[in-house]
Each structure stands twice: as C-alpha cells, then as structure tokens.
Image (cartoon, rainbow, N blue to C red):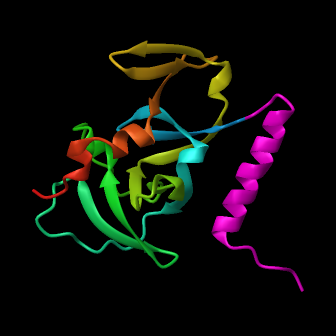
Amino acid sequence: MSRRINLREFQQDLIDRMQAKGRTGDQISTLGVQIAGQNWVVDMHDLGGIAPLPQLAAAPLAKPWFLGMINVRGALYGVTDLAAYRQQGKASGAAANRVLLVAERHEFNAALLVERVLGLRNARTWERSEAGGEVQYRDEQGNTWNRLDVAGLLGQPEFLQIGA
C-alpha cells in the first residue's frame, strides 16, 4: 500500500529538492506568477503553499482588495487580491486564479490572489535593475519580470489596515 503525502509535505519536499539542486549550481528559487497582466517572480522561501481559490468567507466593511477569509488545512488566511491592492484592476475569478499562502516564517496568515501561476523561473541568470525601490528582471527573451517582496508587502501599513 502506498503512503499518502499531504500538500505541505509535497511542497516542502519540492523546496528541499530545489535547494539540493542549487548546491550543485543550478538552483531555481523563484516562482513566476501573473498579476494584472504583468509578470512577477516570488521567492519560493516566502511561500507556504499554492492553491486554487476556495470558497471565501466575506469580511464586511473591508477594503475592496481584501476579499475575505479562507480555511486551508484548518488555518484561516486573509485573502488579498494583489491586482486590486496595487490599483491595477482585479483578479478575474477564472479557474486559473491561485492563492499564494505566505510562509509560516513570516508569522502572518495571508493569502495573495494572483491571476495565474507561470511556473518555476531561474531569475538568478536574468539581468537585474532597480528603479524607485522596485526590483525588475529581464529574462533571455526580453520579458520584464517584477519582484514581489513578500516581507515588504507585509510591512506596509496600508496592507495591514483592511478596514474600509
């Protein structure tokens, strides 16, 4: 009989294997996502999981970008639509939308709604630039990727103030 692996164990195993591969010189440490039609990369160490958008429990009198609460593996997470938070529209609600669960190390039960996950990316080989405190990368095909600074986002007073 095969042993069942839960999602958290699977994701941790994936991170461990990527880090082990990184010790041999070919580490992929970022996840590509799309927010408001733009390409973004997120450090895998900032993520505790990725899931389809489950049923939301509404949060009355909250800002429009705060969509409500979700229950993932018995823990409650506040869901933020990153496109709406950045005042660039809002997520479509399509089947491709995903929530990125913030890693436990941040001690913050936040879920960040993105349009879609684009897969693992190796941003270490890309051309890096910085403008106005924002980090951007240019990949081999000339595509621009923004860096999502999860710790910086969690430290923004506006992000912490969800009441309308």
Q: Is residue 9 visible?
A: yes
| Left or right placement of residue 125 versus residue 139 in this view | right
**What is the quadrant of the C terminus in the image?**
bottom left
Is residue 64 or residue 149 the one in the foreground? 149
Image mark count: 0
22 relative to 39 in the view: left or right: right
Any part of residue 35 in sight: no
Q: Position of residue 37 (x, y in %)?
A: 39, 35
Q: Looking at the image, is 3 positioned above or below residue 44?
A: below
Q: Is residue 21 magenta?
A: yes
Residue 10 magenta-highlighted: yes
38 vs 102, nearest the viewer: 102
Which residue is drawn at the image coordinates 60% and 44% (left, top)? 44
In the figure, residue 126 lies in which quadrant? top right
Name the spot of residue 106 as percent of width and height, x first.
Answer: 47, 52
Outermost residue to the right? 1
Give the residue displayed 23% in from the left and 72% down from the top: 58
Please tell me whether residue 21 is drawn above or below residue 52 in the rendered image: above
What secondary structure is the stretch in magenta mostly built from? helix
Q: Identify the image quadrant of residue 142.
A: top right
Tell me the quarter of the picture where residue 80 sits. bottom left
Question: Residue 121: image x %, image y %?
Answer: 64, 34
Judged left or right of residue 113, residue 12 is right
In the image, the segment drawn in magenta is 1-27
Q: At which x and y percent is residue 87?
A: 22, 38
* Closest to the observer, 110 or 70: 110
Q: Residue at x 43, y 64 (%)?
A: 53
Viewer-side residue, 116 vs 147: 147
Name the quarter where the N terminus is drawn: bottom right
The answer to whether 18 is drawn above or below residue 140 in the figure is below
Q: Is residue 13 toward the left or the right of residue 71 in the image?
A: right
Instruction: Determine whether 57 is above or below 129 in the image.
Output: below
